[in-house]
């Protein structure tokens, strides 16, 4: 029989790593107030959707999920449904009004109120908490981590940039940084409890600033990597206009910082970059790449790309392809532009690239990236690389899945190794997304 304890909760998490980290914070906050995580949605008396508003199709997915939950709520009146995160913060009251079977909505700065909102829902109240709190960093909360090998650690929240296409400044508010000491101490705690890797998270980590102690992100990264020399350190996301030579030198100097930089470019056309309000030109981006590669020739670079932004011509799309050819990213997250209501682009530009053209351009971008990734990954064949084993392979438990420092996924015959081990793996084959090999020691 399914246990539907009224205090058991299940969180569906959509979107970015920051949302995954927030789910771990919410799990800790609810746990401290006597709620317990359920195995799955079916077993839960409280269902939360931690939502993403970055693209239209992400919002549509939340809508579809909510339709399914509507049926469940009809049969089970005591079920409590909450939507948290970026969608309600972005769409505000109209979203809540349009979904009367949702008991409450809470934005990213309001998670400390969730327990009381659940209690109110049980008494029949429908509450919405969408305030911004520009000091909230959830410092001091000990997140309930979903994994045991790698951990996400938000070091800042919010974003002060104003990229024309992006909802994040609205959904997550102004930038604020987690105090330097807390980040360093938390990383030490993670190492002590057996974690092998930590990823420092922020929408633009280069803006990290602990004003009290006078530390920027380069200082933080250096301190964290020195505090836990046996742990792998990753970070994301860097903004191209802000990444500094000082930061790149820290990455190059510290052996436990992964030599991988995710540096979203979005477009290869200076005119489009200006319309996107990204704050740099194509040439400035390429100069940053040259600077990074001069310091770290073996660095892995990845990016985000948007096809079909407002007024993008075919020639400007080709500039994106040529930038990809020039930089030869290891991999990319690739999207077609979806207009987000209320953003600068929505208010000031015309979303005039037909959907079919956006999708066709995106397809060209994906095909080119796959070809470049395959070529780059194949260069690893015959080499021996160091892999942090993360899990058993989904297809066969005689194999492990892990990642290189450059963030390439590797599937390999496990030998005597287990998840959590750092393994030297000889690469025998590659696809455009995965390296294949065998453990050699
Ligand atoms: N802070 C990061 C940066 O500035 O590079 C990116 C954060 S955003 C959540 C992740 C990615 O989603 C962006 O880099 C962009 O490629 C994509 N994205 C954001 N808004 C979009 C939109 N309206 N349409 C399509 N893709 C979008
Ligand atoms: Fe959005 Fe730009 Fe901020 Fe990234 S830097 S979160 S794309 S506004």
Image (spheres, grey):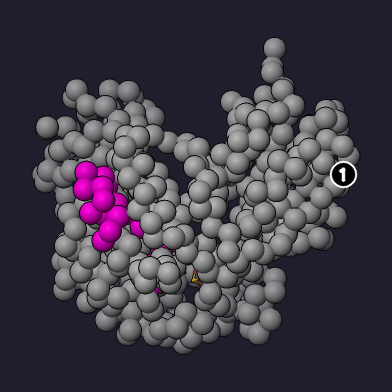
Q: Residue at x 62, y 79 (%)?
A: 345
Residue 188 shows in this picture: yes
Residue 61 shows in this picture: no
Residue 420 position in % (x across, y down): 28, 33
Q: Is residue 201 above or below residue 47?
A: below
Q: Which residues are magenta?
A: 222-239
Location of mark 1 (residue): 125
Residue situated in front as seen by the camera: 334 or 94: 94
Give the residue furthest to the front: 212
Give the residue furthest to the right: 124
Q: Residue at x 70, y 71 (%)?
A: 341
Position of 95 compared to 364: left or right? right
Q: Residue at x 72, y 34 (%)?
A: 46
Where, quadrant-wise, is the N terminus in this rendering? top right
Residue 223 covered by magenta stretch: yes
Position of 200 compared to 98: left or right? left
Where, quadrant-wise, is the C terminus in this rendering? top left
Task: Classify residue 151 by image quadrant.
Answer: top left
Residue 331 position in % (x across, y down): 34, 58
């Amino acid at each position: 029989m399914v246990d539907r304890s009224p205090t058991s909760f299940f969180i569906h998490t959509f979107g970015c790593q920051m949302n995954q980290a927030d789910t771990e914070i919410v799990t800790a906050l609810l746990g401290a107030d006597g709620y317990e995580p359920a195995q799955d949605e079916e077993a839960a008396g409280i269902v939360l959707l931690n939502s993403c508003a970055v693209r239209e199709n992400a919002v549509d997915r939340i809508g579809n999920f909510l339709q399914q939950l509507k049926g469940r709520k009809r049969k089970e009146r005591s079920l409590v449904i909450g939507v948290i995160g970026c969608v309600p913060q972005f769409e505000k009251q109209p979203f809540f009004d349009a979904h009367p079977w949702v008991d409450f909505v809470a934005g990213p700065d309001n998670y400390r109120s969730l327990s009381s909102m659940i209690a109110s829902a049980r008494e029949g109240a429908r509450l919405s908490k969408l305030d911004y709190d520009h000091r909230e960093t959830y410092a001091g909360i000990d997140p309930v981590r979903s994994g045991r090998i790698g951990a996400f650690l938000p070091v800042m929240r919010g974003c002060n940039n104003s990229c024309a296409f992006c909802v994040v400044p609205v959904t997550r508010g102004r930038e604020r940084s987690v105090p330097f000491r807390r980040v360093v101490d938390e990383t030490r705690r993670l190492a002590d409890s057996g974690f092998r890797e930590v990823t420092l998270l922020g929408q633009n980590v280069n803006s990290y600033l602990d004003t009290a102690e006078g530390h920027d992100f380069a200082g933080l990264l250096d301190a964290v990597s020195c505090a836990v020399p046996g742990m792998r350190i990753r970070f994301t996301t860097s903004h191209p206009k802000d990444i500094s030579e000082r930061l790149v030198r820290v990455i190059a100097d510290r052996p436990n910082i992964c030599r991988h930089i995710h540096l979203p470019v979005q477009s290869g056309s200076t005119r489009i970059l200006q319309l996107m309000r990204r704050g740099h030109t194509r040439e400035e981006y390429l100069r940053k790449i040259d600077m990074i590669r001069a310091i770290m020739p073996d660095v892995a670079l990845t990016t985000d790309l948007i096809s079909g932004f407002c007024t993008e011509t075919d020639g400007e799309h080709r500039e994106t392809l040529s930038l990809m050819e020039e930089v030869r990213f290891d991999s990319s997250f690739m999207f077609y532009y979806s207009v987000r209501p209320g953003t600068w682009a929505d208010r000031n530009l015309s979303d005039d690239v037909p959907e079919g053209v956006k999708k066709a351009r995106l397809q060209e971008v994906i095909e080119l990236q796959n070809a470049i990734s395959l070529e780059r990954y194949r260069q690893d064949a015959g080499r021996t690389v160091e892999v942090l084993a993360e899990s058993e392979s989904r297809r066969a438990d005689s194999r492990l899945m892990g990642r290189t420092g450059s963030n390439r996924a590797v599937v390999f015959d496990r030998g005597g190794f287990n998840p959590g081990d750092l393994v030297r793996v000889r690469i025998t084959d590659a696809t455009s997304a995965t390296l294949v090999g065998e453990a050699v020691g």
